[in-house]
Image: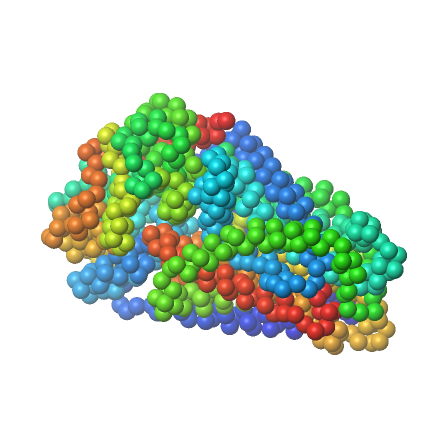
Amino acid sequence: MRKTLLSALALLSAASMTVSMALPAQAADKTLTIYTYESFVTEWGPGAKVAAAFEKTCDCKVEWVGVADGVELLTRLKLEGEGTKADIVLGLDTNLIAEAKATGLFVPHQLAPQGLTVPGGFSDDTFLPYDYGHFAVVYDTEALKNPPRSLKELVEGDPDDKIVIEDPRTSTPGLGLLLWVKSVYGDKAGEAWAKLKDRVLTVTPGWSEAYGLFTKGEAPMVLSYTTSPAYHMVAENTERYQAAAFSEGHYVQIEVAGMTKTADNPELAKAFLTFMTGPGFQPIIPETNWMMPVAATDAPLPAAFDKLVKPEHTFLYAADEVAANRRAWIDEWLSAMSAK
Amino acid sequence: MYTTREASAIVRAGGIVLASILLFAGLSTVVLLFHAEGGAGGALFDAYLFGVARFTLLQASLSTVLSVALAIPVARALARRRHFPGRNWIVRLSALPLGLPALVATLGIIEVWGRRGIVNQALATLGLDNPVSVYGLAGILIAHVFFNLPLAARLLMAGLERIPPEYWLTSANLGMGSGAAFRLIEWPVMRGLLPGIAGLVFMLCATSFTIVLTLGGGPAATTIEVAIYQALRFDFDPPRAVILSVLQIALTGTLLYFMRLLGTPAEEAPTAGRAIRRFDGKRGRLSDGLVILAFTLFTAAPLLAVVAAGFASDLPRLAFDPLLHRALATSLAIALASATLCLAVAMPAIAIAPLAAADRAPAPLRYLAGTLQATSSLILLVPPVVVATGWFLMLRTFGEVGRFAPYVVVVINALMALPFVIRVLEPAYRTHIARTGRLAVSLGVTGLHRLRWIDLPALKRPLLTAFAFAMALSLGDLGAVAIFGADGVVTLPWLLFSRMGSYRTADAAGIALLLGILCLLLTLPSTASGKNARDDA
């Protein structure tokens, strides 16, 4: 018995050593540590290009720390508290801003970047936007000939044409749709959900599951982003998947970054935030993060982006309004969707 | 059974194991309980939570009853038909679903049972335009049976194969029919195993998350596990997450306690160790064949869908993807370490049982053994996300948390595999010790000699099976890695989700194929057809 245990421990430590050896080595003198969501730093994500571009200007080293998603990012900060290594946190969205500020870990950026074009006129003293995307119902043109042209048509349409949505309790797009319906229907949101319920094939825990079901052909519609078709056009060369333009307007997700009060080098952090809203960063975003840039880029957007739905009206709740009402609105959603 | 020295070594090891498990899980929950900041408050027990708890138990009960009830004929048929082409491969399939992330298996199930799946298309060509709906309770049940029927069948089959071969000789001499053989030989063995197996399946279904949400059709289908996840992430209310976990453990634990009362282990009987030969093989060929065929189709079809999607991906490019190599190495290292740790932890927990079951076992010993058994079972109900978060909080005081991530993941995976490993090893060990225990002691083959020359050779096959299960579980687990983030620890499931999350569905399918192949390879040593039929136990 003891022998087994000893050899197990030896193996265990050997294995973990190998794993920890694989960790990137700590970098030189000036390092900027940026916490972000994981897809930002995958090999196709903007991370590597952004780091390379910024490192040319700053004589420093950018170190990325990627966690699962925007919500996890905030959880991670709350867990780490003032011990956090993060100088910059990049990847929260406007719905998380109020809670992020409440941690007391962020300081105002004191910057006034010019020429930002963010729908809904978002501006904040602590967080700066770096990209945005409108939520949209993406549909399969081969399965659905007459896509809904408004949220009202989505709610009241044929229950046999199904949609897959995400759960607002566990995912950001899910919360986005919840806020979208609330923006359009207000006090009648509960009734709208009760109606839409029959069209909902299922409610998945996250975007990946929903999009997976959609591309497998289980439902002709899915809640995603107006930019989703761009990926299929650019990477897969197909126009099969399209976003439906809704006449009421679309709810927007604005992704933001802020600097922490524990940043080792506040000037460097500020320099990065300035860089982020400028021409060194913005043109990288569209085809790596599949979101819209917040500032005009020198070169025009890739051709696929011209074909995307451009919402005429944008919905956006103020961050503190979301924070104050999220629980009540989710409860309203729950009771409407759970009703028999 | 044991010498005094062996007995005290086992008791000591058992004590250490129990203390370590309790400390590992307990510390993390205590830390979370006191990390009360930013909690949104609100009533803890409301009508909503009541509904969630009710649905959790309802779907888990139904899933368990279905999985276990269907496993009985499957295990019987497989145990009776010992030689037919492909039998080994069918047995090997049983560890496969465990090693696939729930999302992958769910998508495989949808290829078969979904609105555009094979079943509905076949029904459509027959002129039925009302497709079978996989979204709702039915879908949850199909998915849970897919995951757990092979597991339950495998465990029951192992029990049937431990029946002394002399029984079959005698039953043939007595001219017993199939019904009598079931009543007098097979059922007593299965009845002894059922509470343990049903308990395991129940816990797995009660803590199901992705399957329940994705196939549930709406928020009416929500488990407590979802509420825990929500409390820890969107609401960031760690104390609430802990309290919900306690609720989950209490509810499920109570049910399991009553389930345990239903069955008692079958009596062990000696055997001369002759080869298993089933004289009742001539009867029931057709029905056994149909049962095995249906089981194979049901289990293999979604897996084939996963395989087909995998082959459709750009495999050559994936094969030279350095990140995939790194993820593969990390996943294998973590899985190897956690399976080894799991077996090391399981051994004392199993060896202590015969001691505590002895007639004059002292009360403290019985108490220790009982607690150890309950703990190593119920650990499955402690959400990994809670334990991982607790350890994250503790470890951050010791510097960079990312450095500790692999260790924590290894331990969490090992603990999650513990109930499986015990279900595989415990019955085999009980039979083994009943057959060899006294003899070994009277011959003076004790301590490490006994372990080396008597225990390990006889238990080789269950040990390999347990190891394969533990590794498969660890390979397919995303859990704790997600909490610690990708600071250098990239595992295969993590990579799979990362590709999926950035539209690279085909790459994800390729990685799923790799996971499936790995799990299949793992089962090879434990199912290799040995010449010695005794090894079949």
Is B328 situated above or below A113? below
Residue at screen point 78% across, 74% down: B446
Quadrant for the N terminus of chain B in the image: bottom right
Number of marks: 0
* Residue nearest the observer in this picture, B152 or B118: B118
In which quadrant of the rendered view does residue B153 lie? Answer: bottom right
Q: Point out residue B49 in the picture as x, y percentages from the top left corner.
A: 53, 33
In the image, taking residue B510 as reference, residue B10 lies left or right, namely right
Is B515 situated above or below B102? below
In the image, taking residue B477 as reference, residue B466 lies left or right, namely right
* Residue nearest the observer in this picture, A329 or B63: B63
Q: Point out residue A64 in the picture as x, y percentages from the top left corner.
A: 31, 59
In the image, taking residue A44 as reference, residue B418 lies left or right, namely right
Is B446 situated above or below A190? below
Quadrant for the C terminus of chain B in the image: bottom right
In which quadrant of the rendered view does residue A65 lie? Answer: bottom left
* Residue nearest the observer in this picture, A150 or B249: A150
Residue at screen point 26% across, 50% down: A238
In the image, taking residue A69 as reference, residue A284 lies left or right, namely left
Q: Point out residue B27 in the picture as x, y percentages from the top left corner.
A: 56, 53
Residue at screen point 60% across, 37% down: B58
In which quadrant of the rendered view does residue B520 lie? Answer: bottom right
* Residue nearest the observer in this picture, B253 or A200: A200
Q: Is residue B1 visible?
A: no
Q: Point out residue B116 in the picture as x, y percentages from the top left corner.
A: 43, 43
Q: Is residue B263 visible?
A: yes
Residue at screen point 41% across, 34% down: A200
